[in-house]
Amino acid sequence: MAYKVLLVEDDTQIVEMLQGYLEKEGYDVTAALNGVDGLIRFGQDHFDLVIVDIMMPQLDGIEVIKQIRNQSAVPVIIMSAKDGDVEKAIGLGFGADDYIAKPFSLIEVSARIKAMIRRATMYSNPETSVLQDQAPEFKVLNFGDLCIDLDNYSARKSEMDLKLTAKEFEILKLFATNPNRVFTKAQIYRWIWNDEYYGDENVINVHIRRLREKIEDEPSNPRYIKTLWGIGYKWDGQ
């Protein structure tokens, strides 16, 4: 069965080009030309991945992502002609998993989609996960008031469920199952995004910041995810 992709983009030329290419690649693509229509279509079907443009009429991409995240952890890729750090930080901060700058290569888009769907499929099937062999004897990890359920892919803090995106949980699991091991940003990117790292630190920085905001009592003075300046990060939970 073909993977279903929802493409929310107001530029008809981009829609025709990208939809035609992805359908030739074997994807089932549903297109929406504005944010409102995108949310309506998202509610009418199940999608394996969503691609959202940032600047759109009626409802911008950021609001679309926020509303999608209120009901689903589906992988989301944002597209924008603005490729500055601020634009990326805003988009990723609201729950996007990856970012593609316009103009883009169709081959690059296809590769990003394949990698993200592959990771999402492994994420939803723990017996095939590349992380499963790191700590097979553990099902639930407890660190003070933080509880991480590896089987159910969920986390709780002080008995409150944490709303983590797929990428946030994968990063959390990578750290928590490897306490005191130092990971460079390149290692984190290759492991979580299953792609080569080209030095775009912003993607890693934003995800770490968002994860800290959800699991730490004091995100600016983290207890669990420690920064080793110039090197990377490590999990310091006991």
Image: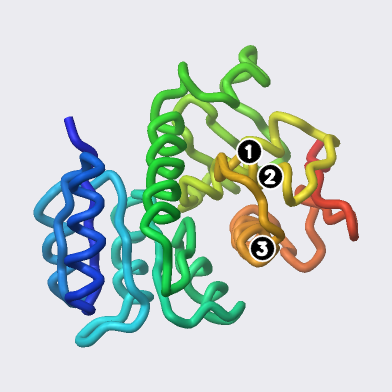
Distance (Cα) linking label 1 and label 2: 5 Å
Residue 124 lies in quadrant? top left
Query: Which residue in the rendered view is the most extreme toward the top?
Result: 137
Q: Position of residue 2 (x, y in %)?
A: 19, 36
| Residue sitting at x 72%, y 64% | 219
Element under disc 2: helix
Front residue of 156/43: it is 43
Q: Where is residue 176 in the image (x, y as percent from the top left)?
A: 70, 35
| Res. 195 in view | yes
Q: Where is residue 217 in the image (x, y as percent from the top left)?
A: 71, 59
Query: Which residue in the rendered view is the most extreme toward the left?
Result: 44
Element under disc 3: loop
Q: Quadrant of the C terminus?
A: top right
Residue hosting label 3: 200
Residue hosting label 2: 188
| Residue sitting at x 64%, y 53% | 215
Residue 16 lies in quadrant? bottom left
| Residue sitting at x 49%, y 51% | 164
Horizontal side of residue 154 vs 51, given as left or right: right
Q: Position of residue 78 (x, y in %)?
A: 40, 66
Horizontal side of residue 5 vs 213, given as left or right: left
Q: In this view, does 207 lie above or below 103?
A: above
| Kind of residue at disc 3 | Asp
Distance (Cα) linking label 2 and label 3: 12 Å
Count neighbours of disc 3 (C-alpha within 10 A) and say few if under 14, some if 14 to 19, many if 20 or more. few
Residue hosting label 1: 191
- Sequence-first tag of 2 and 3: 2
Distance (Cα) linking label 1 and label 3: 15 Å
Q: In this view, does 59 lie above or below 1?
A: below
Query: Given this view, does label 1 or label 3 mark the residue nearer the observer?
Result: 3
Please report contact status of discs 1 and 2: CB closer than 8 Å, yes or no: yes
